[in-house]
Image: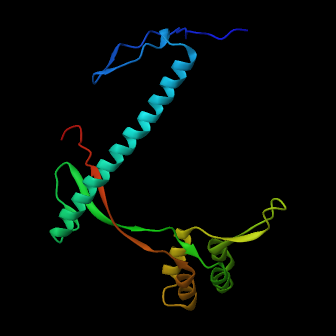
């Protein structure tokens, strides 16, 4: 069985010029190796362009953050955008021994929210106890504020402040706006 030297299309051909002025390659006339090389090259260019735009976006956000902080503000007023600084946090790290201690101090219906038993699935992954949902644990900590269980739950959940981040959202315009 021989290899194909051209690619047959059943769909309409691509335009010679893609909107924006980019010239599209003529795939039909390419041999297999050239076509694969072209596709690989296009994918690499797409990655590079995406990385470039991410870098530009990060630079722009850094400038917005500098301006907000320079003004001693937490946001920039705009009729079209919501632009503010928010705290950025790491994921929670849990001390399972403290969660187990807190679990023994809570009623059964709430204890299951603090940590859960995960049975052994294979010989490679032994049975263990995993932390519950951070929102559930935080809600219990707030519900029992001032009590010993709230203190244990507070000590069991830690996370680090990573700094501030700029959040920009376009404000949706109503149909009649």
- How far from the left and from the top, in percent, is residue 64? 22, 58
* 172 to 113, vertically: above or below: above
* 80 to 93, vertically: above or below: above
Of all residues, the one furthest to the right in this rendering is: 123
Look at the image and tell me in which quarter the C terminus lies: top left
* 171 to 7, vertically: above or below: below
Corner quadrant of residue 20 = top left
Q: Is residue 24 left or right of residue 78?
A: right
- How far from the left and from the top, in percent, is residue 67? 18, 63
Give the residue at x 39% y 45%: 51
Disc count in the image?
0
Give the residue at x 36% y 13%: 15
Q: Is residue 113 left or right of residue 92?
A: right
Corner quadrant of residue 113 = bottom right
- How far from the left and from the top, in percent, is residue 147? 53, 90
2 or 49, which lies in front?
Answer: 2
Q: Is residue 92 left or right of residue 170?
A: right
Give the residue at x 54% y 69%: 134
Look at the image and tell me in which quarter the N terminus lies: top right
* 107 to 13, vertically: above or below: below
């Amino acid at each position: 069985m021989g290899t194909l030297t051209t690619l047959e299309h059943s769909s309409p051909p691509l335009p010679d010029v893609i909107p924006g002025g980019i010239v599209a390659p003529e795939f039909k006339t390419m041999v297999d190796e050239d076509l694969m090389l072209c596709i690989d090259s296009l994918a690499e260019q797409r990655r590079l362009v995406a990385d470039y735009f991410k870098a530009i976006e990060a630079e722009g956000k850094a400038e917005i953050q500098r301006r907000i902080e320079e003004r001693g503000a937490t946001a920039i007023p705009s009729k079209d955008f919501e632009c503010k600084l928010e705290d950025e946090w790491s994921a929670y790290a849990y001390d399972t021994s403290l969660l187990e201690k807190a679990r023994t101090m809570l009623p059964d219906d709430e204890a299951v929210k603090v940590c859960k038993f995960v049975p052994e699935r294979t010989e490679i992954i032994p049975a263990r106890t995993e932390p519950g949902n951070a929102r559930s644990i935080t809600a219990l900590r707030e519900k029992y504020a001032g009590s010993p269980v709230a203190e244990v739950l507070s000590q069991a959940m830690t996370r680090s402040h990573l700094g501030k981040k700029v959040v920009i959202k376009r404000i949706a315009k109503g149909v009649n706006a």
